[in-house]
Image (tube, grey):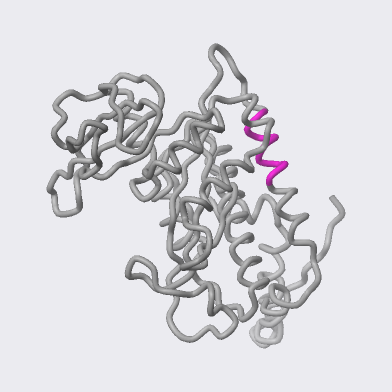
Amino acid sequence: MSRFLNEYKWPTRQVIRAVRQAAIQQIMSQPRSGRRPTLQVIIDLTTLEKAGKFKEFQNLVRVYNGKRGLHVVMLYLVVGRWRVPWSFQVYRGKDTPTPTQLGLRLVRRLPKILIRHFKVLVLADTAFGNNEFVSRIHQLKHHILVGVCSTRKLADGRSIKHLHKRGQQVRLRGLKLTVYLSWYYLKRSNGKLEKRYILCTKALKASTMTWWGRRRWAIEGFFKTAKHRFGLHRFGQQTLLGVYRWVILSLAAYLLAHWVYLNAPEHPLPDWGDAAQKALELLLPLMTLLPMLAEIRRLQPLAKRYGIDINVTWCKI
């Protein structure tokens, strides 16, 4: 596995292109009726935490926001039932492009076919709620709904926490365009409610803004699944290429399991272990059968000792 990831010369970019083309085909194949559907483009930063020394990654494995590891800005697409981890960029620290700038770069690289077919709504948390990010997304002719700090100032000098009406049109200090501001209450793990402010560049009802604002949390569930079910943060490679390939294959494994889950007769809450096993059996059946055949071969002498004769016959299908 180490040689496969670190040394073998297989076309990593061709794998990425093939996965993306398949993802676009699946998304575009869905029946469309009525208005142009909305493509949720969710951007967030996550840390693939690592301990120990990594000489080859001095500019990559670092401490940021109190966490040490690889800091990845991820672009995650949601449309209908489909969930697609589309692309990512690694934050390299001071004097390099900021997470906000990396997020803008990811949005700019969205395929034109998706932009033509869908209405794009960019969702992000408070870390991306600065004037630069909002203005640049607006210049790309996309709408954005993003979290903002309660300390943000209005053009007249007041703080946004002094507002009393949800969904009202406001002007923020340093931001030329007019935006709409609302808030909702998020229940934390300790049971307390936390007030979260959101702004949007599109005129929406306060209840609609709240609904979209909560949709951003879909990426947090993806991060937990990708890390704990598909090993996203468990890379141990000693080359940059190896780590890059590990992340690509981890995301591809999640995507394949997600597709198999969507094709199940019913759609309860996903059991990702079961979905991954079904994906393996459906897409790579020999990878499932060969370990069993190897075990049978190993146990044949023991079986013969007890008068059991085991023969495996290959049949043409």
Please say whether residue 21 is one of the residues in the magenta stretch: yes
| Magenta highlight range | 20-28
Using the rendered image of the protein, determine whether residue 231 is visible from the camera's viewpoint: no
Percent x, y for residue 273?
Answer: 49, 57
Percent x, y for residue 227?
Answer: 46, 62
Examine the residues drawn in magenta and state their main secondary structure.
helix
Percent x, y for residue 157?
Answer: 20, 36
Percent x, y for residue 21?
Answer: 72, 42
Q: Residue at x 59, y 44 (%)?
A: 260
- Dividing the picture into quadrants, the one containing residue 55 is bottom right
- Dividing the picture into quadrants, the one containing residue 63 is bottom left
Name the one closer to the observer, 191 or 120.
120
In the rendered view, does 165 fall on the left or right side of 82? left
For this orientation, the residue located farthest to the top is 34
- Quadrant into which the N terminus falls: bottom right
Using the rendered image of the protein, determine whether residue 189 is visible from the camera's viewpoint: yes
Q: Residue at x 59, y 49 (%)?
A: 255
When the figure is inspected, residue 205 is found, relative to residue 240, above or below; the finding is above
Please say whether residue 278 is one of the residues in the magenta stretch: no
Name the one closer to the observer, 208 or 29.
208
- Dividing the picture into quadrants, the one containing residue 210 is top left
